[in-house]
Amino acid sequence: MDLHALTRELHQKNGSKIVMLVADGLGGLPMTAGGKTELETAKTPNLDALASRGVQGASIPVAPGISPGSGPGHLGLFGYDPIKYVIGRGALEATGIGFAMQPGDVAARGNFCTLDTEGKISDRRAGRIASEESAPLAIRLREVKIPGVEIFVEPVKEHRFVVVFRGAGLEGNVKDTDPQAVGAFPLKPVAVDAGSAKTAAIAAEFVAQATKLLAGEKKANGLTLRGFSGRPDLPTYEEVYGLKAAAIAVYPMYKGLAQLVGMKIVGKAQTLKEQVQILTDEWNNYDFFFLHFKYTDSTGEDGNFDAKVKRIEELDAVMPAIENLKPDVLIVTGDHSTPSYLKSHSWHPVPTLLVSDCCRPDGNTSFGESSSIRGGLGQFEAKYLMALALSNAGRMGKYGA
Amino acid sequence: MDLHALTRELHQKNGSKIVMLVADGLGGLPMTAGGKTELETAKTPNLDALASRGVQGASIPVAPGISPGSGPGHLGLFGYDPIKYVIGRGALEATGIGFAMQPGDVAARGNFCTLDTEGKISDRRAGRIASEESAPLAIRLREVKIPGVEIFVEPVKEHRFVVVFRGAGLEGNVKDTDPQAVGAFPLKPVAVDAGSAKTAAIAAEFVAQATKLLAGEKKANGLTLRGFSGRPDLPTYEEVYGLKAAAIAVYPMYKGLAQLVGMKIVGKAQTLKEQVQILTDEWNNYDFFFLHFKYTDSTGEDGNFDAKVKRIEELDAVMPAIENLKPDVLIVTGDHSTPSYLKSHSWHPVPTLLVSDCCRPDGNTSFGESSSIRGGLGQFEAKYLMALALSNAGRMGKYGA
């Protein structure tokens, strides 16, 4: 089902405000049998009070049993079917470092590698070269010049970099040059379709010039390119929901994802308190606000249960300031679970809370994993959350007469 | 997923009886924080006793966050995917006044409007002309004669009427003639495809003759046509479920919707008691009975919480008479929610109760919104209800060996 076919047709505008607070990796697990999750352990008087007024559910980011990355996790929350809309690895990598891809650009993820005297790969990650060593090399690659195409090279971490080709007639359907094995030559970039032939030729020339520029390097004397991809073609929030949307995020990845759906990046917050201040300052300028809180995920990834609990309490503490703005719809959710127990993203449904004057309260009096599965939203695919948000905000007309 | 592909293959016949009692707009909301819904407020000893024996669920009419009209709401309950099967506005309007469209007919919704001396629209609804004034004008339009086509004009309410064209080679893909603005001329009917060219030409001629017939009227001296549509092509209950089905409804809209899926309209009930009497009288003649109760919706639309509570109690009072017939499967549900708080159809899931000798009871002891979300059917799309009904009636074979 194409939910956007419905929201495009049915959305209507009014003066209401929607806030979606995304605590990255919010859902968790107990560390020991019979224990509580991070969210259930945290003291969250403000979220619990909201749970009493609101409706809860357990949101499934993609499908049961599927653990999403940040891209699909956020696309789902934004109402974009994460199976239908795929962000290529190159485009996600570029987005993640804050590079604003333009339509027609093609991005690829680069890996520095070590080549032996024959030119075969002896280490696919250039000995996990440190970022301090690899960044100057990535910047050196900006010396590559190819007529008729603009080339951007940006360092990422360790052996990784991003390259973006900009020019007429470029498409992203080019195969990886990483042979996924040591003792093999890097592959030639091969176009999968006619529209990508020019990209493949440019990539080959880029690799040739880059390899010359890297000659003599001990670790990183070669490179491979993966995940060629164009800018994903996502309709904007304005198109599909009629919403003027703002993103208030600290990290480039989430700003980038928000930008891909047409949100305006506002402010330069470094802390949650600053994010809430920006929300307050921008309150009259937008209909929809996406606030991203990273640290519930990173503490989970670290396996640091107590730190994740603290971060959830930090989040709870700012809720009154958000409530003071009197949003018509307030949503607290996560893009996926990141249980400290697993130290990774997981497939577990995400506790999700929606508060509006016309949500149907479900008798829950606390916010958490156990409450969420007994909530009035049931278990639902995250992609439906935006339709619920719009309806609760009085922004959706009736389907059919 | 095409559920009918399964039910067509798997259904089997037996002597069982299924009753689906649809309380229109059944679901509701509390009027104040911490309060109860209409259904939870009503004294419903009979429904509560059924809830103890039965299984409950929260049915989602179309998709989370989508508020359906009566058409999609009922199609879902009848097991017809309301996204796949769309009833055009003209066809629904004709259906709603009890006009039996035949395959090949094209219906359009007509609006009387006021034209200024130049012929531009000065009021799109003819000053919201009263039905008593507009009905004779609609009947006057029956004087339009076009060779080779039969034309039916039926008054609706206020500025509305329905026109149906019947003849060979008519298709419904014609654009609206309503410019959706005052100070503009009515548009010409434009065919969107070749198959609808004849319809567009006939519609243009109809408008020309009709405008002459209306000349001199103060308010309603013009007309626009909207929602051109053929009779929706729905497979019948007999085809997809092997059920001989009867509809016992008071209002034309619901009789019409039932007719579209091949149900037989039985009786001429004006009250719920009369409906139950007809159910009793016809008990041996059909396998499936659709009973429609309107007033839970209309009281909700009026925002009259207390009146809706009373109507629910009226419904509860007839349950023993229905139970006395010993249906093998008894379903009580709604086509959508109509909370008095919102005074409109809404997206909230609908409390749904199914009782059979082989349903799996879920520990609920009352029927209501809160119980339904903790019910054994969980939250489910309404389109699955018919498969559940058939299985509970022993009317479905096994899928695969």
Image: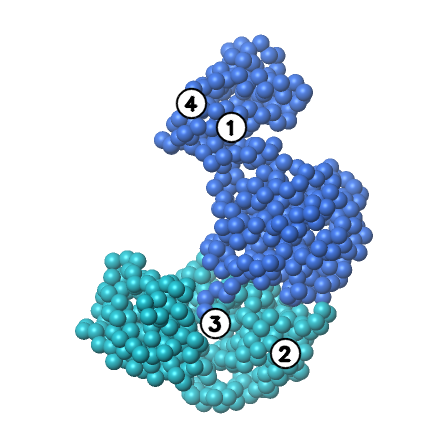
Chain colours: A blue, B cyan
> Mark 3 or mark 2, which has the lower sequence index?
3
Q: Is residue B194 above or below residue B108?
A: above
Mark 1, secondary structure of its residue: strand
Do we see residue B243 in this rendering? Answer: no
Question: Dot 1, how many residues are within 10 Å of its Cα: few (below 14), some (14-19), or many (20+)?
Answer: many
Query: Which residue does the numbered mark 3 point to in the structure image?
Result: B70
Residue pictured at 60% horizontal, 18% vertical: A137
| Chain of residue at mark 1 | A
A267 and A53: which is toward the camera: A267
Residue at mark 2 to residue at mark 4: CA–CA distance? 70 Å
Q: Are marks 3 and 4 on the same chain?
A: no
Q: On the picture, is B152 further left or further right than A106? A: left
Looking at numbered disc 2 in the image, what kind of residue is underneath it? Answer: Phe
Residue pictured at 63% horizontal, 21% vertical: A135
> Mark 1 or mark 4, which has the lower sequence index?
4
Residue pictured at 49% horizontal, 53% vertical: A4
Give the numbered dot on residue A25. Answer: none
Q: Are marks 3 and 2 on the same chain?
A: yes
Q: Quadrant of the N terminus of chain B?
A: bottom left
Looking at numbered disc 1 in the image, what kind of residue is underneath it? Answer: Val
Q: Are marks 2 and 4 on the same chain?
A: no
Query: Which residue does the numbered mark 2 point to in the structure image?
Result: B305
The quadrant where residue B307 appears: bottom right
Residue at mark 2 to residue at mark 1: CA–CA distance? 61 Å
Mark 3, secondary structure of its residue: helix
Q: Nearer the viewer, mark 3 or mark 4?
A: 4
- Report x, y in % for residue A344: 67, 40
Q: Is residue A306 above or below residue A326?
A: above
The reply to whether callout 1 and callout 3 are in contact (CB within 8 Å) is: no
Residue pictured at 67% horizontal, 20% vertical: A132
